[in-house]
Image: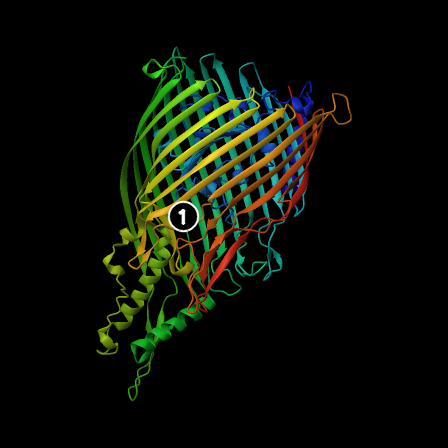
């Protein structure tokens, strides 16, 4: 496949080069995208289709990342943007099946996200679609704080908007070839052309691979070797000065190893079951824009199809205990229409409507294997001995399968409005923004899950009364469907005062919400309980009275029968209010730029993902009281001379549970929110040296960057699980920092770049969790190690017409 992709890309690019016309040096690809393009004030951006102010003047914390920034920092995917923006963090959890985003301490490790992602205004409904290879990005916007009024569901932490290049504004051909240690290899090619004065077409393709970074000592192979390939096409047609249409289609294919989890005291993984993640992701969108006298109309229709396959050894050891193979198929359709004022007047407004339909089918067979069956048999023998029953219940099979198919349809609709009034009370520079959104959502689940292989034999041990063994069918089946509706009202208020065109201060308050629903992963424990209850129920049928001391009837109940199945599966929406005070200033002739924000967020009905029975019985999602997050953000950029820049970004977020009683005797109130860092730091410098046109090397660009995050707690208790001999100690990742750098030599259309990531080979854990060993009962800690030093070279060839 690799060779075929390379040949295809080379052939396409060869054709493009033949018809490319006049060449321009690489450093002149975009006159706006120079060294000084580092912060919002220096990035040439279009106004949003929703906002009533341009991005520079929004009364909220917003960061815009330019193509030059992405290139200098070697950012090739969304997780690589982590900590580059204040209080913005994306951890590595071992595969692209989950890409959680944390902003200001608000995030979700699994399930519905608190930060939404849009690509060319098309939303992604599944975090399994968040991590893809970047190619020809025009800009990335990160809006921090609740954005519910204009964006609706799953935006209580913020929004990430990604925009790709337009063939109407850029024409040319781009080639990239990159290689590095650990078998890193990347090739990309794209072409942007105008087929007529008003019609543009762009096509592109990419292929990237690596040999993996972490060993599996059981197999002797790398755990996480991967391949990623994809392509895209984009068409834009400016039919008249008043109307433009844009269509795009992106395809991404991923295949590779996953989940290189290892014991905290080990340097390699050690498991025997397959560990794999593969994905097909197809996203397309159709945008229509009408510009009328005084207003504009924008329509975006989106479609996304995701099909993936995940295999995981869930005991993370070389024993055959239990494993999972999860497959998803998801179809998502969305439609949004906005009408916005476009005249430069004191009063600006936007109204809009949004609707979506999403259908996700999850096939999740769990297998309890040989060593797991031995452990379950041992636990069952102990339980029967404690009961004093004169018999032994023996599993009839060496394996139990727990297959399940879960269909999760959801649909929703919303109406929203936002207004901005300038020169409020006649005071020039003072403006007020107010907005309101009415959001409706219907969420449901259809399920069919069963056990296969859960039959048992009853072996009696009654003195002087021989009874032959009895075969008992134990398998059980759970089927049904549930649904619920949500209505939310999401307001927003903001005041902004501009002291000058380059100095502003603002105060805002906004509400957001994260959707509720049903958690299919809870069925792992529910089905195991149902299987145990079925075995006991069937075993007691027809048996002599008194066989079970205490009159046990075998219902398998442990208090759970008081809770309905729907209540065990469902969880409610969580809501938030964010209050923010911030400002932007440019000083010293725009050589010094300062951005700051102070914030406070309160999240009600927070959704918590819990590992049941220390990871041996799936995961549940439950609402757990309230939490808050408070802190500040600071961004500085200083360019004393044109060819030299210094920049720094710092974010602090104190995110804690305010009211969270995990159980009758366990109260986590006051504890830190797990998995969210308290600090993010990004420091860097960039230098450009010009040798002049015609020199052997015309320009050298050097960049160095330091990025750091921490402290990160790993559990809700903020501590390790206590043992019989000692109390649990604090369990967290201390603050750590990574040094990255690059130096590029440019000549005409060519650029040769040497780069390094994690230069000092800093050792850190990007993920830690606790899991119980079914065979020993011991609670172990497993980690996902951070990536080691990676270095390589990239050759770019850019033709601009």
Q: Image quadrant for the C terminus? A: top right
Q: Position of residue 738 (x, y in %)?
A: 59, 44
Tally of numbered tags = 1
Q: Can residue 223 be seen in this view?
A: yes
User: Circle 1: is it few (<14), some (14-19), or many (20+) Cα within 10 Å?
Assistant: many
Residue 22 in the figure: left or right of residue 428? right
Q: Image quadrant for the N terminus? A: top right
Quadrant housing residue 287: top left
Foreground of the two, 786 or 200: 786
Query: In this rendering, is residue 562 above or below 622?
Result: below
- Rendered image coloring scheme: rainbow
Q: Can residue 48 be seen in this view?
A: no
Query: In this rendering, is residue 459 above or below 12?
Result: below
Q: Position of residue 731 (x, y in %)?
A: 46, 56
Query: In this rendering, is residue 613 above or below 470?
Result: above
Q: Which residue lies furthest to the top in this view?
A: 293
Q: Residue furthest bottom?
A: 464
Foreground of the two, 308 or 319: 319
Residue at point 39%, 65% (across, down): 453
Pointer 1 residue: 673
Q: Position of residue 238 (x, y in %)?
A: 49, 16
Q: Residue furthest front?
A: 588
Secondary structure beneath disc 1?
loop
Q: Position of residue 372 (x, y in %)?
A: 44, 66
Foreground of the two, 440 or 746: 746
């Amino acid at each position: 496949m690799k060779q075929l992709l390379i040949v295809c890309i080379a052939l396409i690019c060869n054709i493009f080069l033949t018809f490319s016309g006049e060449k321009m040096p690489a450093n002149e690809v975009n006159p706006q995208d120079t060294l000084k393009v580092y912060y919002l004030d220096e990035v040439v951006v279009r106004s949003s289709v929703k906002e009533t102010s341009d991005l520079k003047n929004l009364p909220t914390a917003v960061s815009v990342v330019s193509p030059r920034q992405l290139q200098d920092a070697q950012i090739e995917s969304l997780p690589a943007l982590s900590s580059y923006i204040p209080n913005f963090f994306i951890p590595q959890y071992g595969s692209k099946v989950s890409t959680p985003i944390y902003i200001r301490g608000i995030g979700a490790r699994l399930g519905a996200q608190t930060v939404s992602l849009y690509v060319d205004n098309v939303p992604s409904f599944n975090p399994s679609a968040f991590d893809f290879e970047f190619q020809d990005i025009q800009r990335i916007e990160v809006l921090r704080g609740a954005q519910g009024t204009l964006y609706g569901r799953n935006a209580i932490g913020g929004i990430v908007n990604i925009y790709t290049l337009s063939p109407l504004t850029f024409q040319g051909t781009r080639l990239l070839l990159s290689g590095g240690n650990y078998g890193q290899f990347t090739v990309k090619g794209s072409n942007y052309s105008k087929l007529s004065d008003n019609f543009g077409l762009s096509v592109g393709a990419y292929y990237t691979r690596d040999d993996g970074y972490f060993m599996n000592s059981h197999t002797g192979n790398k755990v996480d070797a991967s391949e990623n390939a994809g392509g895209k096409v984009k068409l834009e047609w400016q039919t008249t000065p008043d109307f433009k249409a844009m269509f795009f289609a992106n395809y991404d294919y991923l295949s590779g190893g996953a989940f290189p989890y290892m014991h905290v005291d080990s340097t390699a993984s050690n498991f025997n079951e397959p560990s794999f993640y593969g994905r097909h992701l197809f996203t397309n969108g159709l945008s229509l824009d009408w510009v009328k006298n005084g207003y504009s109309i924008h329509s975006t229709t989106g479609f996304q199809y995701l099909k993936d396959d995940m295999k995981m050894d869930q005991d993370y050891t070389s024993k055959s205990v239990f494993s999972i193979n999860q497959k998803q198929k998801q179809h998502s359709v969305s439609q949004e229409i906005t009408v916005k004022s476009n005249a430069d007047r004191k009063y600006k407004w936007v109204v809009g409507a949004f609707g979506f339909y999403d259908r996700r089918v999850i096939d999740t067979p769990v297998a309890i294997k040989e060593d797991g069956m031995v452990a379950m048999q041992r636990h069952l023998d102990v339980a029967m001995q404690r009961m004093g029953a004169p018999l032994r219940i023996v599993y009839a099979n060496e394996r139990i399968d727990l297959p399940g198919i879960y269909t999760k349809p959801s649909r929703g609709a919303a109406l929203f409005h936002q207004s901005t009034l300038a020169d409020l009370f006649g005071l020039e520079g003072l403006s007020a923004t107010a907005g309101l959104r009415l959001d409706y959502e219907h969420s449901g689940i259809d399920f069919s899950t069963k056990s296969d292989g859960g039959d048992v034999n009853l072996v009696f041990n009654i003195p002087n009364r021989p009874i032959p063994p009895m075969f008992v069918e134990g398998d059980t089946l759970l089927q049904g469907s549930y649904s619920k509706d949500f209505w939310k009202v999401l307001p927003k208020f903001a005041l902004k005062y501009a002291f000058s065109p380059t100095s502003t201060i603002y105060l805002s308050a906004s509400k957001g919400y994260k959707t509720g629903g049903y958690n299919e992963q809870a069925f792992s424990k529910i089905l195991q309980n149902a299987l145990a209850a079925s075995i006991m129920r069937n075993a007691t049928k027809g048996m002599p009275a008194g066989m079970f001391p205490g009159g046990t009837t075998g219902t398998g109940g442990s208090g759970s029968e008081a809770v309905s199945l729907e209540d065990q599966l469902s969880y409610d929406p969580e809501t938030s209010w964010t209050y923010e005070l911030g400002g932007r200033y440019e000083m010293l002739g725009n050589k010094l730029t300062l951005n700051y924000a102070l914030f406070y967020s309160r999240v009600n009905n927070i959704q918590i993902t819990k590992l049941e029975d220390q990871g041996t019985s799936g995961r549940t999602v439950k609402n757990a009281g309230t939490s808050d997050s408070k802190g500040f953000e600071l961004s500085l950029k200083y360019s004393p001379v044109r060819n030299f820049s210094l920049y720094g970004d710092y974010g602090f977020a104190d995110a804690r549970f305010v009211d969270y009683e995990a159980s009758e005797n366990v109260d986590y109130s006051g504890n830190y929110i797990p998995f969210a860092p308290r600090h993010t730091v990004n420091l860097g410098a960039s230098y450009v040296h010009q040798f002049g046109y015609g020199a052997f090397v015309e320009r050298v660009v050097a960049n160095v960057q330091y990025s750091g995050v921490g402290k990160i707690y790993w559990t809700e208790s903020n501590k390790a699980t206590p043992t019989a001999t000692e109390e649990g100690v604090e369990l967290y990742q201390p603050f750590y920092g990574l040094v990255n750098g690059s130096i590029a030599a440019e000549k005409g259309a060519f650029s040769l770049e040497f780069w390094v990531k994690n230069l000092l080979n800093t050792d850190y854990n990007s993920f830690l969790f606790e899991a119980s060993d079914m065979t020993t009962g011991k609670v172990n800690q497993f980690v996902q190690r951070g990536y080691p030093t990676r270095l390589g070279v990239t050759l770019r060839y850019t033709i601009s017409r």
